Amino acid sequence: MIQLSRFVAIISPTLASATYRCTSDDDCSLNGICTPCSICKCDPGWTSNDCNKLNLQPATRGTGYNHTNVTLPDYYSTKGGNPSWGGQIVQDRRKKSLFYLITSQFARGCSLAGWRPFSTVIRAESRTGPAGGGATTTPRSSSGPSTTTPPSIGIDAAETLPDHCASCKWRNNISVSSAADVRGPWTPPQLVVSNSNNPAPWPAWSEGSPTSQIMLAVEDNYIFTAARWNDSMYGLVKTMAWNTSDYSDHWTEDPFLWRDRRGNWHILCHWMIDIAVHGVKYPRVGGHLFSRNLTGEWAFKLQEVYNTTVHFTDGGHTDYYRRERPKLFFSDDGLLRPLYLINGVQEFNSSASYTLVQPIGSGA
Ligand SMILES: *[C@@H]1O[C@H](CO)[C@@H](O)[C@H](O)[C@H]1NC(C)=O
Ligand SMILES: *[C@@H]1O[C@H](CO)[C@@H](O)[C@H](O)[C@H]1NC(C)=O
Ligand SMILES: *[C@@H]1O[C@H](CO)[C@@H](O)[C@H](O)[C@H]1NC(C)=O
Ligand SMILES: *[C@@H]1O[C@H](CO)[C@@H](O)[C@H](O)[C@H]1NC(C)=O
Ligand SMILES: *[C@@H]1O[C@H](CO)[C@@H](O)[C@H](O)[C@H]1NC(C)=O
Ligand SMILES: *[C@@H]1O[C@H](CO)[C@@H](O)[C@H](O)[C@H]1NC(C)=O
Ligand SMILES: *[C@@H]1O[C@H](CO)[C@@H](O)[C@H](O)[C@H]1NC(C)=O
Ligand SMILES: *[C@@H]1O[C@H](CO)[C@@H](O)[C@H](O)[C@H]1NC(C)=O
C-alpha cells in the first residue's frame, strides 16, 4: 500500500504537468502554491490543475435551511412554502457546538419575486454542526444584520407592506445595525452606502493587526472601505476594470469577499453567464475573482468554480434552476479553510426557494 501511494504521488504530477504548467501562484488562482516543478499545490478546499474549483462534497438532504413544505395562516401565497435565499453561518463565541444561520427569508410566504420588501433577516440555530439538519435548524427570531454577517437583500421598509406578494421598484441602500449579542437587541439600521445591494463585509482585524477597519464589496464587485464599521460614509476604493454591464461575459452579482491566510483577496460571486448563454438560469453559476492587492489589479478567469449540479449523500443529484448568493464558512484554526458553501437555490418548475449548505473538502 505504501509503495502504491508513492507511485501515485510521483505519477500524478507528471500527468498534470503535461496539460497545465504554472509559473506563479496567480496561475494557481491564489488558491495554492506554484511548486518548483510548475505544478499547483492547491490549498485544502480547492481543486483542479489551477486550483480554481471548489472541492465540493455530497450534501445531505434535510440539512441547510429548507422549510419549503411549511405554510402559516398569515401567508399571502402557499405555493412556495416558507422561502429563504442564502445566508451566512456563524459559530457561537462561547458555545462552540452552536451555529447560527443568518439568512434572508421572505415574509408572508412570498417567493423571490416578492423579495423587495418581503425579505427579512432571520436567525436559525443548529446544534448538529454548521450544515444543520432536519428539525434542529429552526428559526429563532426576526432580527437585524450584524457586522460580519452579510444579511438582508431587502430594505428597511418603513412604509406599510403591500397586502399581496409583489416586488416594489424601490432603490436599495445598504445599512448597518449592531448588537452585543446575536440575539439582540439591534440598533436601528444606519445607512452606509446608498443605491447599492448585496453587501459583503470583511473586517480587516487580525490577531497580528487589530484594527476597526472594514472592507465592503457590493453589487458589480465595487469595493468600499471605512475606518470603522459604523462610519456614516464608506469610501469607494475599487471598481473592476472590465465591463460589468448586464449580459456582458463579466456580468456578476452577489459578491462574497474574503482575505486568505497569505493576505490575498478573493471574491466568490454568482456569475450571470448562465443567463447570458442559455436564456435561463442554468448551468454555470459560480465565479471567482482574486488579487494580491485589494485596490490593485484583479483577475477573473471566466471559469466556473461550481455549477448547478449538487450531488447528495443518498446517491442522487439535483440540477438546480437557480443557485445564487454564494457564501463560505471557514475553519477557525487560522488557516481559513473553506468548509461549507452556502447558496440560495430554486429547483426547476418551482417557486419555492431555500438555503443549501454543501460540504467542501475533507475538513467539513
Ligand atoms: C427541500 O424540501 C422540499 C420539500 O420538503 C423537498 O422536496 C426537497 O427535496 C428538499 N431539498 C433538500 C436538498 O433537502
Ligand atoms: C416538512 O419536512 C420535514 C423534513 O422532511 C418533516 O419533518 C416535516 O414534518 C414536514 N412538515 C410538513 C408540514 O409537512
Ligand atoms: C436610500 O437612501 C437615500 C438617501 O441616500 C434616501 O433618499 C432613500 O429614501 C433611501 N431609500 C430607501 C428605499 O430607503
Ligand atoms: C461607532 O461605535 C463605537 C462603539 O463601538 C462608538 O463609540 C462610536 O461612537 C460609533 N460611531 C458612530 C459614528 O456611531
Ligand atoms: C459592455 O457590455 C454590454 C453588454 O454586452 C455592451 O452592450 C456594451 O457595449 C459594452 N460596453 C463596452 C464599453 O464595451
Ligand atoms: C456540472 O459539472 C459536472 C462535472 O464537473 C457535470 O457532470 C455536470 O453535468 C455539470 N452540470 C451542469 C448542469 O452542466
Ligand atoms: C495596490 O494597488 C494600488 C493601485 O494600483 C497601488 O497604488 C498600490 O501601490 C498597490 N499596493 C501594493 C502594496 O502593491
Ligand atoms: C418543467 O416543466 C416543463 C413543462 O411545464 C417541462 O417541459 C420541463 O421538462 C420541466 N423541467 C424540469 C427540469 O422538470
Image (spheres, rainbow, N blue to C red):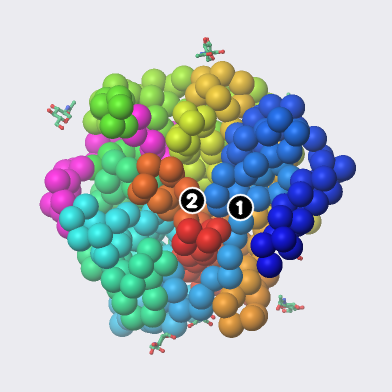
User: Can you say whether 357 is above or below 239 in the image?
Assistant: below
User: Can you say whether 136 is above or below 26 in the image?
Assistant: below
State yes or no: Cβ of the residue under disc 1 lies below 8 Å from any atom of ligand 6: no
Q: Secondary structure at mark 2?
A: strand
The residue identified by callout 2 is 338
Q: Which residue occupies the foreground of this view, 279 or 40?
A: 40
Q: Residue at x 55, y 25 (%)?
A: 292
* Res 349 quadrant in image: bottom right
Magenta span of residues? 178-205
Amino acid at the residue labelled 2: Pro
Give the left or right position of residue 237, taking residue 42 as reference: left
Q: Secondary structure at mark 1?
A: strand
Q: Residue at x 23, y 42 (%)?
A: 177
The residue identified by callout 1 is 54
Q: Residue at x 30, y 25 (%)?
A: 209
Farthest residue, direction front: 3
Question: Does the CB distance between marks 2 and 1 fall below 8 Å?
Answer: yes
Q: Which residue occupies the foreground of this view, 33 or 227?
A: 33
Q: Earlier in the sequence, mark 2 or mark 1?
A: 1
Please indicate, yes or no, whether residue 343 appears anywhere in the rendered image.
no
Q: Main secondary structure of the magenta part?
A: loop
Any magenta on residue 201?
yes
